[in-house]
Image (cartoon, rainbow, N blue to C red):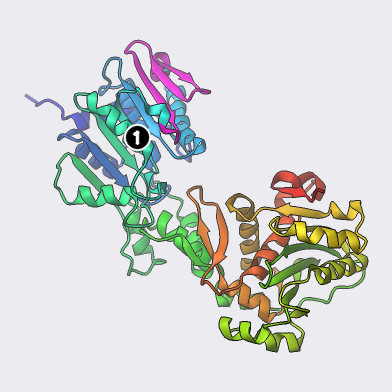
Amino acid sequence: MAGRLKRSERNARWIESMCFVPDGKLVGKPVKLTKKQRKWLVRIYDSPTRLFILSIGRKGGKTAFIAFLLLLHLVGPEAKRNSQLYSTALSREQAAILFSLAAKMVRMSKDLAHYVTIRDTAKQLLCAELGTMYHALSADASTAMGLSPCFVVHDELGQVKGPRSLLYEALETASAAQESPLSVVISTQAPTDSDLLSLLIDDGLTGADPRIKVEIYTAPLDADPFDEKTIRLANPHFDELMNKEEVFRQASDAKRMPSREASYRNLILNQRVEARNPFVSRQVWTENGAAPRPLEDGDEVFGGLDLSSVSDLTALALINEQDGAWGVHPTFWLPEDGLAEKSRNDRVPYDVWAKSGFLQTTPGASIEYEFVAEYLRTVFDRYTVRAIAFDRYNIKFLRPWLEKVGFSEEELTRFIEFGQGFVSMSPAIREFESLLLARKLRHGNHPVLTMCVNNATVITDPAENRKFVKGKATGRIDGAVALAMAVGVMPSAADEGKSFWETKNEHTQEIRP
């Protein structure tokens, strides 16, 4: 006589009989659990579990697995009458991903659709017969007050910076009223050892509390990050669920573009790494070092203007299309007084560059915006200027000089305010990278611009947006920022069929009085 099924096997059979693949090449087919997924079910259900942490590389089947668990507890054999289920994420967009996947599985199954009501706007699933409810929450901790969850999913907890999350704490505290609550953390690793997820993983791996279980797949930091064997260590479903070609493409891009390596190590290799890397390798920069054709009268140009404060470097980068590539034409200004001292302090030959014509100097100890305005007047008189992106910080000091040298109101509308934060800079950096990788920039190895690009590092926010920061305190990056802004306001392939003026306002704003 056969013995009773273990909880894990019972749950596995329910998943495979009730759930269908929601997307991909096997969409519509009955779910067939992998060996790893069955192993995770065993660890969760065949012995007491309070917290289960699953950490693997991105696109490794984590979200689908968690959707299975949600449905198990909402309407399957793990469902408890009148129970509350929640998932959490830092952003509404992230919170919606798991909900949408679970909702899709419900719609694809006649049996599940019969019992489960979907509330898309509220991000809720309900089973009236059992009185169970699932709700996807984003990072407003106040929404967790007064709740009593028996099942919680913490989605991408690795995005939490530091050792605390109010939403995590609120829900974990709220679940204490339940007899046997279960929390699941699903995430790639956090960047540092002091972040919340790292602390939870390290505590779980000690075995001090056997009800805390950790399944982590990561590559050693000293392994070759671009070797297939290394990639497989962090991705147990590499052969089954992942797009191998896309992973290898990301590995190749990260190898050539240092700015992408930290993100690649974190998301693909599931390593604890700070998302800060040099923007571009010397090799890739050199590959784009062909001399641009000199600008001619009437040429159409886009520009980026990074205005300095007082004594720092001011940069203007103009770009124009040249036979399928983009010529880069930078201009830099520094105050004349103290130039030799600044050269010594920064260990950069500003004085030599000034004598060679690579750097313009303005009289006195601070940047005279009059000279910048007069130069811009010449640019507008000679070329067809489509747009000049500018950093809003010091524009109030430049505008009076622009008006003084004769800029009309129509010409002033071509100065486009461009934010320096993650949201504005990330698309510009992405397009900048794409041009470099495609060898479609011609910068002529301008020494000041090259210095700025070499000094630029990239940091990433939890939403994977990026911006430039200095690699060191004295490192000037103004030229890199100006060039990125110029790239950011030019038309892109994605805007084909639209005029520049139809698309520019997505992340920019005209200069206003």
Residue at image point 64% right, 51% down: 424
- Can you say whether 240 is above or below 347 in the image? above
Residue at image point 39% right, 61% down: 273
| Magenta residue check for 216 | no
Residue sitting nearer the eye, 121 or 107: 121
Query: Residue 132: where, in percent of width, then height?
Result: 34, 17
Residue at image point 26% right, 19% down: 80
- Can you say whether 29 is above or below 355 in the image? above
| Magenta residue check for 130 | yes
Q: Residue furthest top?
A: 129
Q: Amino acid at mark 1?
A: Val
Query: Residue 93: where, in percent of width, then height?
Result: 51, 37
Q: Is residue 268 visible?
A: no
Disc 1 crowd, CA 10 A, few/some/many (<14, 14-19, 20+): many
Q: Is residue 341 visible?
A: yes
Residue sitting nearer the eye, 276 or 361: 361
Q: Which residues are magenta?
A: 112-141
- Is 348 placed left or right of 261 in the picture? right
Q: Which residue is mark 1?
A: 153
Residue at image point 73% right, 61% down: 486
- Is 424 placed left or right of 458 in the picture? right
